Image (cartoon, grey):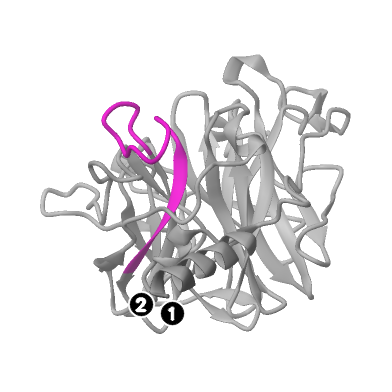
Amino acid sequence: MKIKLTTFSLFLQLFAGITAISAQQPSWTLTSFVKQDVDNPILLPIKNSEFYCPVSKQNVHWEAKDVYNPAAVVRNGKVYLLYRAEDTLKSVDGTSRIGLAVSSDGIHFKRQSKPVLFPDNDFMKPYEWAGGCEDPRIVETTDGKYIVTYTTYDGKTARLCVASSRNLQKWKKHGLAFQQEKYKDLWSKSGAIICKRVGEKLIAIKVNGKYWMYFGDTSIFLATSKDLINWEIVEDEAGKPKPIFGARAGKFDSRLVESGPPAMITKKGILLLYNSMNLHENGFAGLPPDAYSAGQILMDKNDPTKVIGRTDEHFMKPDKPYELTGQVNQVVFIEGLVYFKKKYFLYYGTADSKIAVAICTL
């Protein structure tokens, strides 16, 4: 009888779009995310949308090649996506710009015709041209300002940067996140600031008198800030960036780990959803070589450097046609998370080509 009940339970989970892996995750995780297959992918490239590039001084089809890796935020009862879009500039495999789209249901989006954050003839041009502005993450401050961390790419080095806005439309660039001379050329990406959910807002919050940000795309590191603009990297005894956690042999995250959406304080600790890559050889047998999947990790809410829990299994993997084939095959890359209409909406890039969403009902 026990076997029959277990089998029936598994059938119900599969029918609901919830895998057995989700059911096995620790109690502190956000699980049971269901990919919205009827509507996914929710954003695709557009071949004919034009934008006058102030650097190249010509009209470009700024989202013709790929759209992916979006940040997400709830504002005035609607979901806004800040998404990465690439044109077809061959020298850097596409210049990236950040576009803006809005939705009243979190699934069907209307996008603006022009990007809102892009390379310009400003003080950031040496860092942003010609690769552009990539992979945003967004949090809100207590006074209603939006802070975005994004990656600039000059064709050689990726650098984590910061911008702010009051309305999501006009953005002020603040420059490199790490201004210290020894870190100005540090390869740095994927800044996930610790926040707390207040209603439908994700508000940046201090821990021990400081803001904290997880970052990195090999191992995960930490930085602190007094103002969310200027960041100082947490260092080890040798004066180098201190790894907080990294890849694990034989696991789904056997090659690398990379920050996902902003980290979130919960009753159990600081929850970070993260991206990971499987080794090409001798990796996790349950995933294809080089596949990107997603895991979760929990840090002490009073000590963001201390890991207190980590999932043994991925909670999302590439298994849909639009996730398996694209600019980079076998990729789900989570980056935007919002609490909207009593559900968590997780927005992610698929195969570095399109954007999809999965929903978790608590």
Q: Where is residue 34 in the image (x, y as percent from the top left)?
A: 62, 60
Q: Report the quarter where the C terminus lies.
A: bottom right
Q: Give the magenta part as a residue range.
A: 278-298
Q: Which residue is depicted at the point 39% across and 30% down?
A: 289
Would you identify the image quadrant in which residue 78 lies? bottom right
Q: Residue 266 carries which label?
A: 1
* Crowd rating for badge 2 (residues with CA inside 10 Å; few <14, some 14–19, many 20+): many
Up the image or down, 201 lies above or below 60; here it is: below
Q: Where is residue 321 in the image (x, y as percent from the top left)?
A: 65, 35
Residue 60 covered by magenta stretch: no
In the rendered structure, the answer to whether residue 164 lies left or right of residue 38 reads left
Q: Report the quarter where the N terminus lies.
A: bottom left
Would you identify the image quadrant in which residue 159 lies? top left
Residue toward you, 23 or 212: 23
**Residue at which label 2 appears:** 269
Q: Which residue is depicted at the point 38% across and 72% down?
A: 270
Q: Where is residue 115 in the image (x, y as percent from the top left)?
A: 77, 43
Residue 292 covered by magenta stretch: yes
In the rendered structure, the answer to whether residue 187 lies left or right of residue 197 reads left
Query: Seen from this angle, which residue lies furthest front?
Result: 1
Up the image or down, 149 lies above or below 31; here it is: above
Going by the numbered disc 2, the residue's amino acid type is Gly
Residue toward you, 338 or 61: 338
Query: Seen from this angle, which residue lies furthest left?
Result: 237
The answer to whether the residue labelled 1 contacts the one labelled 2, judged by CB atoms less than 8 Å apart, is yes
Q: Which residue is depicted at the point 73% across and 22% down?
A: 56
Q: SS of the residue at dot 2?
A: loop
Q: Position of residue 36 (x, y in %)?
A: 70, 55
Going by the numbered disc 1, the residue's amino acid type is Thr
Q: How many marks?
A: 2
Q: Which residue is depicted at the point 69% across and 52% down?
A: 82
